[in-house]
């Protein structure tokens, strides 16, 4: 074996060949060249020993284990453990992974998602290595770091404590890619100790070079289900986490672990009973331990799913993977993380052909803006400023994503407590402020045409290098004449000053900025929604109908809508505007009974002929045609009552009627 400090190791530092930022021009971590080192080992008949990350306590870290346990750590190569080891057997799968003693679920959850996206996996796990050909005890893996892909070389000595893996261990005893990949990431981060607790968002970016966005599930975006579906279909990496930093790794009775990171492995909408259901598939990096509630492996909900669909989706094994409803997902988890090369997951519902461009900047920020409460123009101008132009926008979708990242932040307490962020300004006016104590601060926006300025800032008297990326959506000019735009602000408002997000609409009409009552809702719907000639032909929203709408959305039963409740309504309004536009094929401004039937099916709901007849009678005019305002009232009630029936049925309540009998009762009265 090679002795530590031999000529096959290099001094620490960075070496770059050619242009940066691509896999063809890798940075070599610690100046170690994998091909050269392996060739030298093979020529001398020796196994590689990495002096820059040795089989020593220093690579474990001084605080990961008690001192007596640290002294008992042993390092073993796969060839010492197995007669015939493999790097990969039968492909790479998340089920190959079982978390070890180190608390790096955040990293393993990201790796679990990586295994589902082969186009990213091939960047991280090179194919030019293994135990069968040219084995020399040396391996390498690639990670993205602050704008560059980095090649990290390791030896294959793995840490064991009391005969068990200290790190991640593979489910198959002679397959070693999970353990070696984890070791390479530990080397990049400085030690195994530095993997014990971390941010899932960091790992997602390090494995892809992409942009990640975090969504709070306690205050979710109104389009959460659409975002999940778009992320799944556009091959994004996804993860989620539970709260409970003080109760980390505590498993609740329902099977969910507190203070833990998971992988989101799927999001689908399936036919269930008489309607549709959004369900989420999630994987636990422990390799076992699953949700025990509705839609779990043995739950009765699967009995009401078509056999072919059930067979395709359900994997009844204790492998850590399970399904749950979107509602339970929001209740049990705190954060959703989505990552891709570009923010394709924000293109949900987009009917156009779109691409994203990115502008990248690396610089140093100064501590001038240490007092975040003082944003004078003079102070802002002393920091690096970056301009971008929004030429046009589609009011349906987000068109700008800004991501700011600290470069090479060390592990000191000062670095951990540093709050970084950026300001967005237009015409010298601060429009948005974003700050966080994490390495990466990212947010998404809908910005009207114009020129904007981004200014990175910090809250402490420290200098830090940063990487700033500005993603801009490029919209084509092909308009779909049959599509109806999402709700917009009144036409009297100048176009450049319009903020078409539901929050802006809410704040414009909300009572003292906190809630909306039925009268304000009526004013909002008639002024914001009924601008289009087609939607206004069927009549305005009456005060009575607005009271009915509010009652359906008012979860607190206080006669008012909060911002979150209004967000749910806004999502439904957008959906039903699109459906109404598509089903009103003759552009009459009304739906007849057959068009109503098609609209209900498009919405994923159900109604038999008797119910259709009663709905047309209850919500239609003398000719039983339904205008847009009445259509919204009808669909909101149908959707809510369908969900109410399903919830009652699932909860074990005694219901002596069918779904159609229930709906016939509540939809006509």
Image: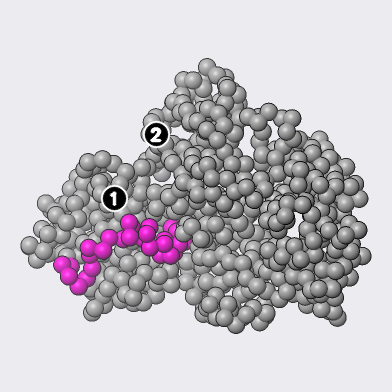
In front of the other: 491 or 562: 491
Instruction: Identify whether 517 is placed above or below 429.
Output: below
Looking at the rendered structure, the secondary structure element under dot 2 is strand
Query: Relative to residue 94, is residue 663 drawn left or right?
Result: right
Q: In which quadrant will I find the N terminus?
A: bottom left
Q: Give the residue pinned by disc 1.
A: 23
Magenta-highlighted residues:
106-135
Can you give x and y, in whole percent of width and height, for residue 68 in the image? 37, 62
Magenta-drawn stretch contains 274: no
Residue 564 horizontal/vertical position (percent): 72, 49
**In this view, 497 is above or below 237:** above
Helix, strand or loop status at disc 1: loop
| Residue that numbered label 2 is attached to | 361
Q: Residue at x 17, y 65 (%)?
A: 136
Question: Is the residue 608 above or below the residue 235 in the image?
Answer: below
Tag 2: Cα neighbours inside 10 Å, few (<14), some, or many (≥20)? Answer: few
Which residue shows up at 70% across the image and 44% down it? 487
The CA distance from mark 1 to mark 2 is: 19 Å
In reply to whether residue 117 is colored magenta, the answer given is yes
Label 1 vs 2, first from the N-terminus? 1
User: Where does residue 260 sit, x and y in percent of width and height?
Assistant: 54, 60
Q: Residue, x 72% and y 55% (percent of image)?
A: 586
Report the quarter where the C terminus lies: bottom right
Task: Examine the rendering and report whether any part of residue 639 can be seen.
Answer: no
> x%, y% of residue 284?
51, 67
What residue appears at the point 66 percent right and 45 percent down from the top-left corner?
Answer: 485
């Amino acid at each position: 074996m090679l002795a530590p400090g031999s000529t096959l190791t290099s001094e620490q530092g960075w070496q770059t060949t050619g242009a940066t930022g691509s896999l063809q021009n890798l940075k070599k971590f610690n100046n170690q060249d994998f091909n050269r080192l392996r060739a030298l080992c093979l020529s001398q008949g020796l196994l590689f020993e990495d002096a820059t990350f040795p089989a020593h306590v220093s690579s474990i870290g001084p605080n990961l284990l008690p001192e007596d346990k640290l002294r008992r750590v042993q390092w073993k190569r796969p060839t010492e453990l197995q007669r015939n080891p493999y790097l990969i057997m039968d492909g790479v799968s998340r089920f190959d992974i079982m978390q070890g003693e180190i608390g790096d679920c955040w990293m393993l959850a990201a790796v679990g998602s990586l295994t589902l996206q082969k186009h990213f996996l091939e960047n991280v796990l090179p194919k030019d290595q293994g135990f069968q050909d040219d084995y020399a005890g040396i391996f390498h893996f690639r990670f993205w770091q602050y704008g560059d892909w980095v090649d990290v070389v390791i030896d294959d000595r793995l840490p064991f404590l009391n005969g068990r893996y200290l790190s991640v261990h593979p489910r198959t005893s002679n397959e070693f890619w999970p353990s070696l990949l984890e070791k390479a990431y530990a080397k990049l981060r400085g030690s195994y100790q530095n993997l014990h607790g971390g941010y899932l968002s960091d790992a997602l970016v390090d494995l892809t070079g992409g942009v990640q966005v975090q969504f709070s599930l306690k205050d979710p975006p109104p389009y959460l289900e659409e975002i999940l579906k778009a992320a799944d279909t556009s091959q994004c990496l996804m993860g989620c986490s539970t709260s409970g930093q003080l109760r980390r790794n505590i498993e609740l009775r329902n099977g969910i672990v507190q203070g833990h990171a998971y992988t989101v492995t799927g999001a689908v909408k399936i036919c269930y009973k008489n309607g549709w259901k959004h369900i989420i598939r999630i994987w636990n990096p422990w390799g076992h331990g699953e949700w025990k509630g509705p839609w779990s492996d043995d739950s009765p909900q699967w009995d009401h799913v078509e056999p072919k669909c059930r067979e395709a989706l359900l994997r009844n094994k204790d492998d850590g993977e399970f399904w749950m409803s979107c509602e339970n997902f929001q209740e049990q988890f705190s954060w959703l993380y989505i990552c891709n090369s570009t923010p394709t997951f924000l293109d949900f519902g987009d009917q156009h052909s779109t691409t994203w461009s990115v502008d990248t900047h690396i610089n140093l920020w100064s501590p001038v803006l240490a007092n975040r409460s003082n944003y004078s123009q003079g102070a802002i101008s002393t920091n690096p400023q970056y301009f971008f132009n929004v030429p046009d926008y589609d009011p349906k979708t987000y068109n700008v994503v800004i991501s700011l990242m600290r470069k090479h932040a060390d592990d000191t307490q000062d670095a951990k407590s540093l709050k970084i962020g950026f300001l967005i300004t237009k015409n010298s006016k601060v429009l948005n402020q974003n700050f966080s104590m994490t390495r990466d601060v990212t947010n998404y926006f809908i910005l009207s045409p114009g020129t904007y300025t981004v200014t990175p800032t910090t809250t402490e008297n420290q200098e830090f290098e940063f990487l700033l990326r500005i993603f801009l959506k490029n919209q084509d000019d092909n308009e779909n004449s049959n599509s109806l735009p999402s709700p917009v602000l009144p036409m009297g408002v100048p176009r450049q000053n319009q903020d078409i997000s539901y929050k802006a609409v809410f704040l414009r009409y909300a009572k003292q900025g906190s809630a909306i009552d039925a009268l304000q809702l009526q004013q909002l719907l008639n002024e914001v929604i009924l601008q289009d000639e087609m939607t206004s032909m069927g009549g305005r929203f009456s005060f009575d109908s607005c009271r009915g709408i509010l009652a359906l959305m008012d979860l607190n039963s206080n006669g008012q809508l909060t911002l979150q409740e209004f967000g749910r309504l806004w999502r439904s309004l957008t959906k039903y505007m699109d459906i109404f536009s598509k089903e009103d094929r003759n552009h009459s401004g009304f739906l007849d009974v057959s068009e109503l039937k098609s609209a209900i099916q498009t919405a994923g709901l159900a109604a038999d002929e008797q119910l259709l007849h009663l709905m047309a009678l209850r919500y239609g005019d003398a000719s039983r045609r339904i205008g847009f305002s009445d259509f919204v009232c009808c669909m909101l009630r149908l959707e809510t009552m369908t969900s109410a029936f399903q919830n009652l049925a699932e909860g074990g309540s005694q219901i002596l009627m069918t779904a159609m009998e229930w709906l016939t009762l509540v939809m006509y009265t």
